[in-house]
Image (spheres, rainbow, N blue to C red):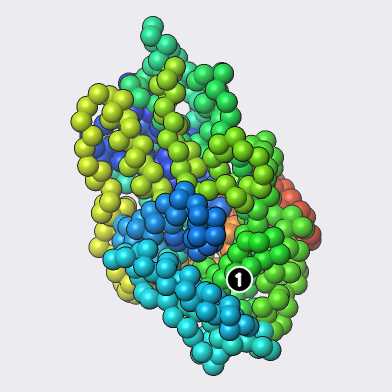
Amino acid sequence: MKQRAEELQGIAGKAFDVCVIGGGATGAGCALDAQLRGLRTVMVDAGDFAGATSSAATKIIHGGVRYLEEAIKDVDPKEYHVVVRALHERIRMLNNAPHLTRTLQFMVPSYDWLNVAYLDIGLKIYDWLAGSARISPSKYVSRRETLERMPELKQEGLIGAVEYADGQFDDSRYDMALVQTFSHAGGSALNYARVTAFELASDGKLSGVSVTDQLGGKTFSVQAKVFINATGPFTDAIRTMATASVPKRMRLSKGAHILLPLDVFPTRDAMLIPKTDDGRVLFAVPWCGRLLVGTTEQEVSPEDELFVSREDVSFMLGQLNKYLEHPVSASQIVAGFAGARPLVSAGEGGDSKKIARDDVIEIDPDSGLISIMGGKWTTHRAMAEDTINAAQKAFGVPVTESPTRAHVLYGGGGFTGDLWEKLAAAFPIAKETAHHLAAKFGTTAWEVLELTKQSRGLAEPILAGSAPIQAEVIYSIRHELAATLEDILARRLGVQFFSWREAIRSAPVVASLMAQELQWSNEQAKSETARYVGKINGFLEHAGLEPETVSGTSASRVPAN
């Protein structure tokens, strides 16, 4: 991927076939599909890639067990369609990014035989709907085996569990793999590039956009034949920018997650709590050395600041502790995150939990803007395929087959499970670092480690005793358009999702590396560090935890130029 200044130069004032607004899962999927079909494509995002909804998922690739239950109970064809489509897309996500995904067994503990029968029937339907895309059959698991695999489960009254299979993925890195694959296919991508206005041709159709570089302050125009709005929670803002009179379609639902030390519930499998107090499901999933617990559902607006609140913590721990032999307290939380689900409303009121997770493609008859709305991570590729089909129809050309169904993403080509061993054998790095690099970058980890040959200090950990190394910071800036501390610590390296406190303690080292690479002044580096630390401390305080300071950090030294 080109460096940011080069990307900017190649976009500003240029003309393209397709302009995609939004660089999350759906936008990046649309951009990749269009570029691979031979359409010259540009993608811009007002923030960072996966900077909002697309990095706030529960990290599972699934059809949706709850959606299936609702489809059956409510005789809802929309929910049925969501489940079937997602079950078939699930296997494509697993195959197209083997370095960022894995299959995962889910266990539903049961304390009632009627519940076992109910779950068993429902999950057999789930298996049947998956057809040839089924991962492994669901089955009943005995009490003894259940406790062997989940020893911290509450034992009193436990009958056993029903087991089924879905997938797991790293959402931030998956989005970056989409962006990188798009870029290496010849596409142009730019983050921190906000669309501020549309330009119209004489027939009233969109012909261009004004874009403001959020980092440099420059405003420039981009011309295109077709514009695709893939901005998730911000879809209505772009729609009304194109045509002020369009009715709003989006309803947003906040989903919060917390992360706990994995030893509070040591397991290789995921647990599904089938019925929470608000009628939803709750997942407890092993992820990157933590136990990820979520999620919640609360209607919000695009202007709301999203964070894990004390109420979110109380609710999730309350539901989780019903299933634990030794209850967990809020003080054990190490990290958390919240995002907004972009749900498409047909104008009905009522509970957002009842809105189908289906996607909708809208073509504005006045402006020609194509908006792809709703959906979920698991169906992002199929949503993109349908959207680019619509774009080709808008061009007046025959619709061609999507090439993304079996297109391996950047970092996944040639990936094998023993990559970490090869990395550790070739470079003087810890086993934990080798595992981390293989899981975050796939075969691109070789390129990250090549930087350590130029400066041995780049092989040092960012924080003493932790897996991420300083070379990842440099690589993320040069090849992944990382521009802020949060870009790197949250979405490129995953430190912020592993531990809020480790992210704070890592910030001064990362800021120093960024200052060298981006020619920041000492004052700017300090300012960026203070801003980031303040934001993360805000997350801690919202969740009811004590804030952290950066003094006394045990971070490794920063290598000299």
| Residue at the image position 45 percent from the left and 50 percent from the top | 77
Q: Nearer the viewer, residue 210 or 502?
A: 210
Query: Residue 429: x and y, percent?
Result: 42, 70
Query: Residue 557: x and y, percent?
Result: 56, 60
Left or right: residue 288 compared with residue 416: right
Query: Residue 155: x and y, percent?
Result: 65, 88
Seen from this angle, which residue lies furthest bottom? 144
Q: Is residue 58 above or below residue 110?
A: above
Q: Quadrant of the N terminus?
A: top left
Q: Nearer the viewer, residue 120 or 89?
A: 120
Query: Mark 1 Cα within 10 Å, few/some/many (few <14, many 20+)?
Result: some
Seen from this angle, which residue lies furthest top? 202
| Residue at the image position 25 percent from the left and 40 percent from the top | 36
Query: Residue 228: x and y, percent?
Result: 41, 30
Under mark 1, the amino acid is Ile
Asked if residue 244 can be seen in this view, the reply is yes
Asked if residue 105 can be seen in this view, the reply is no
Quarter location, residue 314: bottom right
- Mark 1 element type: strand
Quarter location, residue 20: top left
| Residue at the image position 51 percent from the left and 49 percent from the top | 357
Residue carrying label 1: 273
Left or right: residue 543 compared with residue 490: right
Q: Nearer the viewer, residue 546 or 460?
A: 546
Q: Is residue 541 above or below residue 400?
A: below
Could you tell me how many numbered marks the image carries? 1
| Residue at the image position 51 percent from the left and 89 percent from the top | 142
Q: Is residue 489 above or below residue 22?
A: below
